[in-house]
Amino acid sequence: MHSPELREDTYLSDGAYPVNLFRNHCPPGAVGRSALYLHWHDHFEWIYTVSGRAIFHIDSQPYETAPGDLLLVPSGGLHVGYALTEEPVEYWSLVFNRSLLQGLPVDPLHDRYLAAFAEGSQRLPVKFAADEAQYEPIRSGILEIGEEFAGKKRAYELVVKAKLYQIFALAARFCMPERDGEQADRTGRRMDRFKSLILHIESHYADKLTIEDAARLVSLNPYHFCKVFKNATGRTFVEFVNQHRMNVADRLLREGELTVTEIAERVGIDNPNYFTKLFKQIKGMTPSEAKKRGGG
């Protein structure tokens, strides 16, 4: 774990749409001057170098960049940057929370191809160099997202989300292990086994449901249940329940009819402080911020 003092509370435009593009300029000056201060956050971040040369340290590993180079900072990665020349440096930071990439409650394709990378159990490459032709679709996608943020035409948010999903999928393709059809079929069968449980969670999200209770619903012992549930959904049982509760809470906050405390109770959390901490961890903003953005 990195120091909490270095954690950046990155502003993302919306808890339900957790993505933002920052255009950063480092003016000319001495070699080695700061281009990006040392920090970390819970989000992923694409860094695209527009002009100049810099070196970024991501989880203690150095990566030099020139125009056209891309870096992917993993969720929770400690990162900092310095200019390599006296010339100005310009780079974009496309910051997004992994919740933006989540599929349907039961989504075998998402779980097969993206979940491991989004959840951090498998790591994507950090550097996608400009001189490597196979990465051109990823670079083009980043540039197109920049154009969408600049123009902000109607439904640009949906276009950005679609392109970001595509970019992340293309990045995952480069280090994705091959799976045979038999393994894919086993995954599908496991998903079918948990459909009734997932529907139960969605319908009774405010109820206290222990791991032991959930295991009984699918006729498994708790240890085996935890292992199979994670393999089937890409998330632990607790993570899955908390994610759904926060999705419901986010909707209630934006409707603006209930207080934060009332909403915490409505989704089955008795401690308002814990609710606030959990909501911010999952949605990238506090409940009060979500409520304000919903007009409440």
Image: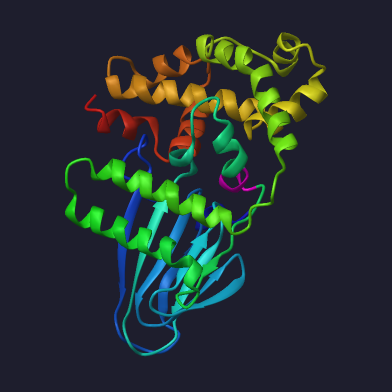
Figure quadrant of residue 15: top left
Look at 55% across and 37% down and name the residue there.
Answer: 110
Figure quadrant of residue 67: bottom left
Q: Is residue 145 left or right of residue 169?
A: left
- Camera sees residue 272: no
Q: Which residues are magenta?
A: 116-120
Q: Is residue 27 left or right of residue 218?
A: left
- Camera sees residue 178: yes
Look at 51% across and 48% down and name the residue there.
Answer: 42
| Quadrant location, the C terminus | top left
Q: State yes or no: residue 119 in magenta.
A: yes
Q: Nearer the viewer, residue 208 or 125?
A: 125
Expressed as whole percent of the image width and height from the top left, the position of residue 156 reads 24, 45
Look at 45% across and 45% down and name the residue there.
Answer: 97
Is the stretch drawn in magenta largely helix, strand or loop? Answer: helix
Look at 70% across and 30% down and name the residue there.
Answer: 185
Q: Is residue 15 left or right of residue 256?
A: right
Q: Is residue 185 left or right of residue 265?
A: right
Residue 115, compared with residue 95, is above or below; it is: above
